[in-house]
């Protein structure tokens, strides 16, 4: 079955550590996205990538980094510069070919907690 | 800037009652509109979407939404609530093909037995 996988499901980080969240898709989608979700705040876009080896900052990119070396993979690193990283992180992907109003498909999420 | 508002962060309905979740958007052109559902500790799942054509859109699980350009609204309804409908619902807007998707803040739906 095609879909998006995120790992791990739960992640604990000590202050000052960098951690990397995995996102893989086998939908052959061109675009991939990372969102952060906090209670009562909906989804906020961290980074997105519309093509391999290219990505753009979203609304809250500070303290995060990404790479897009393969079409299937879009890992997110939460660096020690992110002051309040405890949140639920969602990865999504979408087709970026005509028609261009296609919806995003979401992974199951990773819950990151800073100890 | 484009925005999405969802009136009511929490909505409670009785089992079997009508579900109405409100969504309004700000856009100078008719946008693409989406409703997603999120169950606890899971990702989002598409319920339905409006792109062009018929303004009444039917989705999964008995939900439907109507695009009203004059009211800049895209409210989500279901005639009879079921316990399994308890979840978080997000309205989302994409102004043009090349824009990012903007998500509303979400509405948490509770269904009372």
Image (tube, coloured by chain):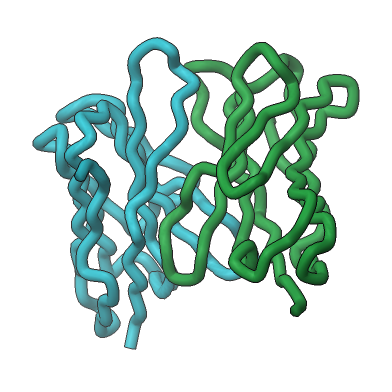
Chain colours: A cyan, B green
Q: Residue at x 28, y 33 (%)?
A: A55
The quadrant where residue B23 appears: top right
In terms of image quadrants, where is residue A22?
Answer: bottom left
Choose between A30 and B68: the one closer to the eye.
B68
The mark total stands at 0
Tell me the residue at 21%/75% (across/down): A17
Relative to B13, is B96 on the left or the right?
left
Indicate the position of residue A108 as horizontal and vertical percent values.
Answer: 34, 60
Q: Nearer the viewer, residue A18 or B44?
A: B44
User: Residue B59 lies in what quarter of the image?
Assistant: top right
Q: Which residue is most to the bottom?
A: A115
Tell me if residue B25 can be seen.
Answer: no
Is residue A2 at all visible to an observer of this figure?
yes
- Estimate the x, y position of residue B21 in percent, counting from the top left: 77, 51
Q: Is residue B95 left or right of residue A71?
A: right
- The quadrant the C terminus of chain A occupies is bottom left
Q: Position of residue B109 (x, y in %)?
A: 70, 65
Q: Residue at the location (77% across, 69% down)? A: B15
Residue B19 percent coordinates (x, y) = 79, 55
Compared to residue A8, the image places residue A94 above or below, namely above
Query: Residue placed at 68% from the left, 31% from the top?
Result: B2
Q: Please identify the residue farthest to the left as the structure is shown.
A: A69
Q: Quadrant of the N terminus of chain A?
A: top left
């Amino acid at each position: 079955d095609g879909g998006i996988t995120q790992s791990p499901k739960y992640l604990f980080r000590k202050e000052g550590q960098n951690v990397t969240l995995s996102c893989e898709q086998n939908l052959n989608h061109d675009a991939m996205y990372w969102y952060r979700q906090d209670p009562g705040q909906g989804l906020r876009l961290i980074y997105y990538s519309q093509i391999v080896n290219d990505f753009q900052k979203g609304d809250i990119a500070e303290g995060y980094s990404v790479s897009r070396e393969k079409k299937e993979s879009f890992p997110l690193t939460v660096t020690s510069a992110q002051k309040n990283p405890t949140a639920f992180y969602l990865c999504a992907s979408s087709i970026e070919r005509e028609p261009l109003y296609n919806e995003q498909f979401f992974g199951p999420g990773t819950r990151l907690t800073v100890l | 800037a484009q925005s999405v508002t969802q009136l009511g962060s929490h909505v409670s309905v009785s089992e079997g009652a009508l579900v109405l979740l409100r969504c309004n958007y700000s856009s100078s052109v008719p946008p693409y509109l989406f409703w997603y559902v999120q169950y606890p500790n899971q990702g989002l799942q598409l319920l339905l979407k409006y792109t062009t054509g018929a303004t009444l859109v039917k989705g999964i699980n008995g939900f439907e939404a109507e695009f009203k350009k004059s009211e800049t609204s895209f409210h989500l309804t279901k005639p009879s609530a079921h316990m399994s409908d308890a979840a978080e619902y997000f309205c989302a807007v994409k102004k043009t093909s090349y824009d990012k998707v903007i998500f509303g803040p979400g509405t948490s739906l509770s269904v009372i037995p």
